[in-house]
Image (cartoon, rainbow, N blue to C red):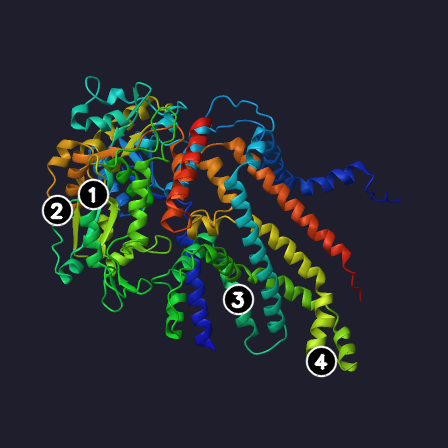
Amino acid sequence: MTRVQSWRNGRYIAGNYLFVLPFLAFFLVFTAIPIVQAVVMSLYNWAILAKTHPFVGLDNYVRLLDDQIWWQALRNTTWFAFLSAGAITIFSLFVSLQIRKPGRGRNVYRFLFYVPVVLSVAAMGIVVGWAFNTQFGLVNALLAPLGLQPINWLGEKELVIPTLALATLWWGFGGPMLIYLAGLQSIPRQVYEASEIDGAGRWQTTWRITLPLMRTSIFFVLVTQLIAHIQVFGQSYLITGGGPGRESYTSIYYLYQTAWRYYHMGYGSAIAVSLAVFILVVTLIQFWWNRRQAAVEY
Amino acid sequence: MKKVLALLLSGLVAVLGLSAQADATKPIVLQAGSANAKTKLVFWNGLTGSDGVTLDGIVKKFTDRNPDISVRVEKMVWNTYFDKLLTSLASGSGAPDVFLLHEFEIPQFASQGVLYESSEFFKPKGELDKADYEPEYIKALNWEGKTYGVPLDRHGWGVIVNKDLFKKAGLDPAKAPKNAQEFIDLATKLTIDKNGKHPDQAGFDDKNVVQWGTFASWPKPNFLSTLWQYGGNWTDGKGKATLDTPEAHKALQFWVDLIYKYRVSPKPAGFDGWQSLANQKLAIIPEGCWIYNFLVDSKLNFGVWEYPQFGDKKAAVWTSGHVMYMPATESGDNLVAAKKLITYLSQNTATWATAGMPPANLKVRAALKASEVPVAVTYGASFKRQGQFDTGNVAITEIIDKGYGPELDSALNGLKTVDQALKDANKAVQDILNRN
């Protein structure tokens, strides 16, 4: 009689844990311990090169509450994340709906739309910097024949964040597009056949069948995009330097400068922890809102 | 279809190539000298442009003369460089044997005890003579009574002009303005809208300017130079911020007026000064001497001026310097070899001037010819006559980048009034000074 393997069996459990050990080791070293370390450092006046690090309790957090640069950076970040995540969530869904069905050139379009995703943020920054240059940029050159004056895309207070969001949309919509395409493929064909028999048109099918059944994917894209874009850094750092003034200065940029340019690791950690709490609150609000909507089953 | 695919693949290769090229975190490496050399040095710097290539050439000459020493030169963009340098100095391992900083950064690093004290490079212990450098430069190397680093160059701010545009306007590019009013008059004559009108003429269309007279470029050196000329500074040197003063108002107002009152300069945000100069759309640009290689590469017919006198109290222009350092932990054979390298580089900077950088060593600077290195010669003479180093502070980077830099930018881009920008700058700088 062979002995049945059970999760209660110690050797069986140990064997399974061996499989997750590599991930666990990396997770502990590069994620869990740094998170705990950041929380601890935020309670100290921790200058990176200094020999001693005085304990200051919650002083860094109290200082942050009165720090106008932090609040401006957070406002800019929220506005950017709202625009980018919103635009990517909607636009990538629109594109995936257009290219989901087999047809001539479908793979070419998928390829074209996905290519910008492979660019590093540095390369994207160079391309966008060139494209939106006021004097010599491609975008203004294309607008000139329409009789439009050169637009100072990256130099005007009102335009700089929307321009960075537009660039991010071009750079980043390919990833969510793939998620949507996978989600669209998982919708049972029978549902569409039934709606066709019932006489539903294309518009009705999209609104009443596709979008409700894609809700999980849409919610996933929205949540992950918002989390990603609240952590925006490269666009502001490489394309505008946070300017004009501080109009495109973002929270992570402030964190980076505080910790690595000014060497205040303690205060930088307080910024990091506060931003993490902000992201958590935004995400919880999204989950709360999502739960309030009726679930769709098929 | 095949053509389309080929085009797409070419595009993909191009963007991937760009992606790889744009990876700013990877250093550009030069291995100078034999891999079997007895002593192996590592030299980090942030000179990723053609100036870095010039410095590589000097390092190669050093290893040719000293076959027992090899030097691995690693060049990174300045921000990446500072990240890596900071972590290597903080961890106490992996730090380079030799690295570059600016003189104004000495207090930041020296106050933490991570720099090697350098008085032994100078006579009587060493080969170098302090008399070969400007006294204010030697003074700028001091922190709490000790000397840190050995100067490589004295770079800084001056003015480059587009001679062709001057000639087209019937003006003499060799005749530099003597004061603020002459500068404004010149810039007015050189600013032209699409109808050929100048800013002082009725109907001038400032929305359609085809050629700008000048450009309020990098705010820090322009503002500091002008502020010093008016007799002010950003601090009294005793822990008090002094940016909300009449001198600071006059200095910033001058640059803001060039944009909004005299309409001879565009708003800085979104304006590419270097490309505009090269494309015959800008006549006068206040700029650093590091523009020299760009001027040569773009084949511009350019002239060089010493920084003009805008203020009414004294002559002054912002200068800085690349200074060579070793970590405080440097020891043994590497210490001996690093000292040799630093001494050699400091004595052989004539080639360095071909990158536009005036050598720090006055004897080397005096031997340069204006016909060969016009920027290094004119700027160098200007620095000797009126050059001023910024006031050192343990939090200088924070004071500039967080304290007053963005406020100057806000005023120049019309986001804040001069009064508001300077009040905010003063408060921010005072907060930083109080905390440090």
Q: Is disc 3 on the same chain as disc 4?
A: yes
Where disc 3 sits, the SS reads helix
Judging from the image, mark 1 belongs to the subunit labelled B
Give the amino acid at mark 4: Gly
Chain identifier of the residue bearing label 2 in the image = B
Mark 3 on the same chain as mark 2:
no
> Do the residues indicated by labels 2 and 1 lie within the same chain of the protein?
yes
* Gap between marks 1 and 4 measured at Cα: 73 Å
Cα gap from disc 4 to disc 2, whole angstroms: 77 Å
Pinpoint the chain carrying mark 3: A
Q: Give percent across and percent down for residue A196.
A: 75, 80
Foreground: disc 4 or disc 3? 4
Residue type of the residue flagged with mark 1: Tyr
Say which label, 4 or 3, has the lower sequence index.
3
> Looking at the rendered structure, which numbered label has been put on residue B372?
2
Number of the front mark, 1 or 3: 1
Residue at image mark 3? A113
- Foreground mark, 2 or 1, reads 1
Q: Which mark is residue A201?
A: 4
- Give the Cα separation between the discs numbered 1 and 3: 50 Å
Q: Which mark is residue B307?
A: 1
The chain carrying label 4 is A
- Within 10 angstroms of label 4, few (less than 14), some, or many (20 or more) residues? few
Relative vertical location of residue A212 with respect to residue B421 in this rendering, above or below: below
- Residue lying at the far right in this picture: please name it: A1
